[in-house]
Image (spheres, grey):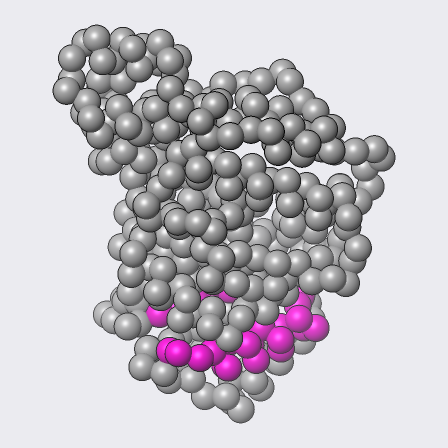
Amino acid sequence: MNIAIAVPVRDEERGLPHLLTALAAQEGVEQAMLSIYLLFDGCTDRGVEIAKAFFERHPNRGGWSVIERQTEPSAGRARRAAADAVLRHCEFNPPDILLTSDADTVPDRDWIASAAYDLRHVDVVAGYTARDTATSLPARDALEDYLERLHALRRRIDPLDYDPAPSHPWVGGANLGIRLSAYQQLGGFRELESGEDRDLVDRARHDGLRVRHSRRMRVRTSSRLEGRARGGLADALRHMASEVGEPQVEHPFDAARQYGRHALARRAFFVRDDTELDWIRLGSSIGTPAEALRTIAGRAANAEAFVMKAVPVHPTSRSLPLSKASNMLDTLTPEQFHE
């Protein structure tokens, strides 16, 4: 199996050696052809020098590549550029899968092997990213715990056989894998300032690609509050650290009702007999006209593509303090949302 790893880098001379050491120590992939691509994006530190010296000491069967560009730094555009470098350099021997990470991130020793395992079953895998403990962020910890519990309820209401428990709700470029065929089908990362990772996964779902949120594929990333990318994790952590008062979240009952709509649409796609009455009933439940549902179903590659396109986002004006939402979540059961 050919595996390529693309990593955008911006002024990460302190964290980069930890990433490179972790990649060089990967286990369970001795027979794979690994190639690593580092895209240095408007850097002013010694990162390139450090990387080249490391590569000389640790030759890699598939090769290490250092690409430099002196443009206005952008994490989203740099991730796209790193992936483009993979495609250019591997034109005649393309990888089977593409993995992405960040230079302030340390993968577990079985990270690549875990990604390869998951990508034998799905098209895209979003791994689990833990934050280091250098910065204490109790409000963020509480919010993440709540969102994980809410996601667990979601998968009980609307289960997916290719995303089995224990799943998680997170998507991040620091820990993402995709089959190259799927990446090319989607047209790759968009050149966004930030959020290019979530955008890619969202488009994958709309195209009917199978997305798994895997706890097997794990990395640890920085919890610093001053990051390199605008709109990245550091910005989100800093914003939460500066907030006064308890975070407000969507009412969990409203979120669970939306998961129930997804489940209803998924079942309808599988058992439909294309009668007008079926579409009218479904449309009245999820808020989409029957004729539109018929058209979407005819064009959808599978149930996931149908659900993503057919079920509208139902905005809610209800929100709760996190502690109240957490207590209410404890009272909700999947049976309440099965229609």
Q: Pick the quarter of the image with the C terminus.
A: top left
**Residue 183 appearing in the image:** no
Image point 31% across, 29% down: which residue?
Answer: 266
Q: Give above or below for 332 relative to 1.
A: above
Toward the viewer: 15 or 325? 325
Image point 63% across, 48% down: which residue?
Answer: 232
Q: Give above or below for 323 relative to 13.
A: above
Q: Give above or below for 60 relative to 85.
A: below
11 falls in the magenta region: yes
**Residue 26 appearing in the image:** yes
- Extreme bottom residue here? 57
Toward the viewer: 125 or 186? 125
Image point 39% across, 27% down: which residue?
Answer: 262
Choose top left, top right, bottom left or bottom right for residue 250: top right
Give the percent coordinates (x, y) of residue 204.
36, 42
Left or right position of 290 against 128: left
Left or right position of 157 against 40: left
**What segment carries the magenta color?**
3-29
Give the percent coordinates (x, y) of residue 69.
54, 63
Choose top left, top right, bottom left or bottom right for residue 220: bottom right
Q: Give above or below for 77 relative to 91.
A: above
Question: How many numbered marks appear?
Answer: 0
173 falls in the magenta region: no
Give the percent coordinates (x, y) of residue 95.
30, 67
Q: Pick the quarter of the image with the N terminus.
A: bottom left
Image point 35% across, 70% down: which residue?
Answer: 3
Toward the viewer: 8 or 307? 307
Give the percent coordinates (x, y) of residue 253.
56, 23
